[in-house]
Image: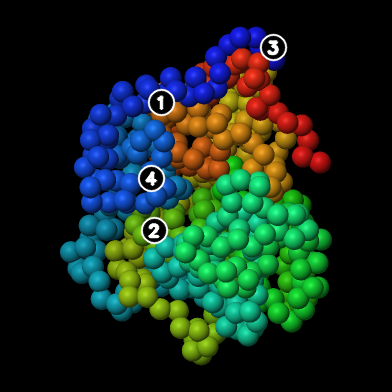
Amino acid sequence: MEHSHGPTLDELINAEEARFIARMGVSADLGERGGAVMPGGVCSSWASSRPLPVWVSHGDGALVWDADGTEYVDMHGGYGVNVVGHANPAVVRAVQDRVTKGTHFAQPTEDAIAVAENLALRFGLPKWRFGNSGTEATMDAFHLMRAITGRPLVIKIEGTYHGHHDSAMVSIFRGSDQLGPEEAPHRVPGPGVLQAAADALRIVPFNDLPALERVLDAHRGQIAGMIVEPMMMNAGIIPPAPGYLQGAKELLHQHGAFLAFDEVKTGMVVHWGGATSLFGVTPDIVCLAKALGGGLPCGAIGGTEEVMSAIETGVYDQIGTFNGNPLTMAAAKATLLEVLTPDVYETAESIGRSMLQGSTEALTTAGIPSYGNVFGFKGSVVFHDTPARNYREFLRISTAISHLHFLVQHNGGVFLPPWGKSESWTLSVSHTPEHGARYVRNVARVAELAAALGDRDSEIFAVGSYN
């Protein structure tokens, strides 16, 4: 790729941000109004994105409209929730029927049984309990592993996000300068989290069985278990190396410790039976949320007879006023039994693979390296020459080009998550090949812009091998 005196990356980003802001007058006004009563003018810090938060009016199927009336193909999906599509008729019918019969009792309703039965079939784990979010599900996993074993330490993968409870908000970095040495990664607590919470964890890289074995050997009799996303989902998409998940399970069991899969982002999304079924490794515990509720707040935790008997016998109280809420269970039942049937995953993956192929071809033509992955409703394109195998490697990739990509997609009618480098696209049962083609056209525009970059920005896509 030859460069001379073309625009800088900052100049390209500034131009796209100017286009973005010019279209978003109502969102800007709502943000200013919201700022008077909500920190940052938003409901969650994740919505506070540059150059300004996008306020949404409504959605229908694969489409969403912002407060200014602009229509987008929605590949944000509410951070991976809306694989059923917006206002899915089956989910709407289920919720409308349920809401007329009462919305909260703090007692179980029959729909909860149907949801648990289907989850047991999909994930191969016999017993299930419900909560309200992925944070609650992973919190229960931490508690169960420690309560059953009586051991203090849990192993966590470096850089992964498992919700915002104290046990999980450790070793989540935005810069490689915070990581520490590879053989002894830093255990840094998040803001407001005590160092004691970080001290109760041990950190290992993803896809590294020797590192896991070293930690288990160094802390014999102290490790309660390990929590891991079976594929890393906050680093583009990083699949497990062949044999990694099975090897981790065997090592943990040899040391009397449990294996918990955080499938909050992958469950019912990458495969009918989640990553558990996709990779053929059944853990002791599975944590679910996001797509399960069909757009309603929902969480679930499934486990083996051994694990879940701890709840039945009172060793651990898994509690919550809204657990198994009737509206949520009605939506989840419709989602599982009527919408997310096995055939829809093949259709979504076919669209995704066409998106990945078209994107990489456009980038290659412009002399820009890239890689990506597609699993079910999820996919990603990363602007770099070497696929990352763990979080450390992923942090070396430019965030600036990912922000440019987000802006070009948004200005071109495709709504992606604003944190472009770390988040993948989410399709739904309503997406079509034409929707995917719009994404590819926008990637081609990014390629065209990037191909004209000046000398100082010409190497941002490729820094060589990570080895």
Horizontal and vertical percent position of residue 90: 32, 52
Q: Nearer the viewer, mark 2 or mark 1?
A: 1
For the point 74% across and 82% down, which residue is it?
Answer: 221
Question: Is there CB contact under 8 Å for labels 3 and 4?
Answer: no
Residue at far bottom of view: 313
Residue that numbered label 2 is attached to: 293
CA gap, disc 1 to disc 4? 16 Å
Q: Earlier in the sequence, mark 2 or mark 1?
A: 1
CA gap, disc 2 to disc 4? 20 Å
Q: Is label 3 in a helix, a strand or a loop?
A: loop
Label count reads 4
Q: Amino acid at mark 1?
A: Glu
Residue that numbered label 3 is attached to: 2
Q: Earlier in the sequence, mark 1 or mark 4?
A: 1
CA gap, disc 2 to disc 1? 34 Å
Q: Amino acid at mark 2?
A: Gly
Residue that numbered label 1 is attached to: 17
Q: Is residue 200 left or right of residue 439?
A: right
Q: Is residue 174 above or below residue 110?
A: above
For the point 76% across and 31% down, which residue is it?
Answer: 464
Instruction: Classify 10 Å Cα crowding around label 1: few (below 14), some (14-19), many (20 and above).
Output: some
Q: Earlier in the sequence, mark 3 or mark 4?
A: 3
For the point 64% across and 51% down, which residue is it?
Answer: 178
Q: Which mark is residue 306?
A: none
Horizontal and vertical percent position of residue 58: 27, 40
Q: Is label 2 in a helix, a strand or a loop?
A: helix
Q: Quadrant of the N terminus?
A: top right
